[in-house]
Amino acid sequence: MKKIILLLLISISGLTHAANGVFVINDVCVNFGCFTGDAIGYPVTITQPGSYILTSNLTSTSETVGVIEIQASNVTLDLNGFAIIGPKTCTGSGVSLNCTLPSMGADGIIASGTINNITVKNGSVRGFEDGVAIITGSYFENQIMNIQATENDRGITLHSGTISDCQSNRNAKYGFSSAISAFNNGYLKVKDSYAYGNFLHSIHAQVCSNVFFLNNGSNNSADADCGFYTDESICKDARCIGL
């Protein structure tokens, strides 16, 4: 009887769709595979389009294995106010930042390859190489919204799309960064967001074609760093405020 009840609780808490058709991810279903295409343990692997929602915090102690990996287009991942927590911790701020671990291989949330239309929103990610990294080619439909990324190597990395209403603070390298790829930057906009206390730069655009910084605040000594400038780019130095 106890076994039957346990299996029923597992099913209710994460192995099936929620009532509204959203796929649930939590710290229970990780131990059994949260949905079709996801194996036991981390990373939770999303292989089908749809909406996904966290119903608990997710914590990992691995320095090499990430927590959520998105492998499909047309995915919305709602952290629902919860946190994804890795093993890296940091003390101090800016040039005085001191972190417990060097660069790792584990990301909090990563999406890569020839996929597009990825949205990650509404929560926090702490203690990874990349807190959130969407490096998915030249598409501009990707969005990262209302995410707080702290104590990672890089807080939020987005190849092409929009970062909005986010905070990226006290990361060992960059707060917000773009990614280098064969496509360069198809389009990157960082707006209504804030970064402080990052060791290197608050906003770092490695390839600065079609990159726009809008209404942001930051307080690093070198707040915006771009590899090069083009006529299609707006890359502001100093505080990146008020475009």
Image (cartoon, rainbow, N blue to C red):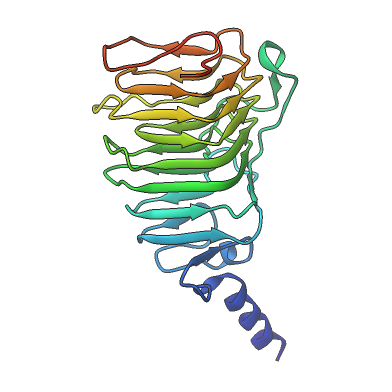
Would you identify the image quadrant in which residue 136 lies?
top left
Visible residue check, residue 240: yes
Residue located farthest toward the right when viewing the structure as drawn: 91
Q: Give whichever of 138, 128 is nearer the camera.
A: 138
Q: Is residue 174 left or right of residue 46?
A: right
x and y, in percent, of residue 164 in the image: 50, 36
> Vertically, is 145 above or below 201?
below
Name which residue lies at 28% across and 12% down: 230
Name which residue lies at 52% across and 47% down: 121
x and y, in percent, of residue 215 in the image: 51, 24
Q: Give whichever of 10, 222 is nearer the camera.
A: 222
On-image quarter of the N terminus? bottom right
Would you identify the image quadrant in which residue 155 lies?
top right
> Vertically, is 73 above or below 2?
above
> Vertically, is 10 above or below 46?
below
Residue located farthest toward the front when viewing the structure as drawn: 242
